Amino acid sequence: MTRLQRKQEYYNQLIFAKKALKSNRFKVSFYHLENAHILGQKHLYRHTLSHCWMFIYGIRIISVKEIIGQFTRILAAILFTNIWVPKGNTGGANISPIKPMPIRKELQKCFYK
């Protein structure tokens, strides 16, 4: 998959997440936000944007842990994306922000030929 195709898949995942969030399907929304995070985490704008949407998700579900976690991750994304990111990390406040993780099976096609 080319970088352009990965970028398009990132935005597709973000659209799925927003639609699910609007429909109060919170688990589905968060799953797609995690996918978007994995796909965009090496790009400063997309990485930060995925955390901004996770922040909005935290507000919608009224989770102080997610709100605080995403606020700090937004700052970290701005400061560190171009230096280092933990590959495969899903980006939620339920996971250590420095923990590398295996790429989800359904996203592997976006990273490997």
Image: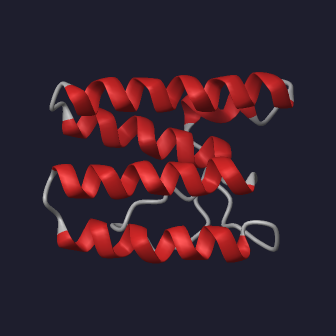
Using the image, determine if residue 111 lies above or below residue 99.
above
Between 88 and 83, which is closer to the camera in this rendering?
A: 83
Using the image, determine if residue 27 lies above or below residue 45.
above
Q: Quadrant of residue 108?
A: top right
Q: Is residue 98 visible in the rendered structure shown here?
A: no
Q: Quadrant of the N terminus?
A: top right
Using the image, determine if residue 72 lies above or below residue 52.
below
- Residue sitting at x 69%, y 76%: 79
Q: How is the image coloured?
A: secondary structure
| Residue 35 in picture, x, y percent from top left | 51, 39
| Residue 43 in picture, x, y percent from top left | 75, 51
Between 29 and 52, which is closer to the camera in this rendering?
A: 52
- Residue sitting at x 13%, y 59%: 62
- Residue sitting at x 49%, y 32%: 14
Q: Quadrant of residue 25?
A: top left
| Residue 65 in picture, x, y percent from top left | 24, 73
- Residue sitting at x 37%, y 39%: 31
Q: Quadrant of the C terminus?
A: top right
- In the image: residue 80, left or right of residue 92: right
Q: Quadrant of residue 85?
A: bottom right
Between 106 and 13, which is closer to the camera in this rendering?
A: 13
Question: Count of labels shown?
Answer: 0
| Residue 10 in picture, x, y percent from top left | 61, 32
Q: Is residue 47 visible in the rendered structure shown here?
A: yes
- In the image: residue 80, left or right of residue 56: right
- In the image: residue 108, left or right of residue 49: right
- In the image: residue 20, left or right of residue 34: left
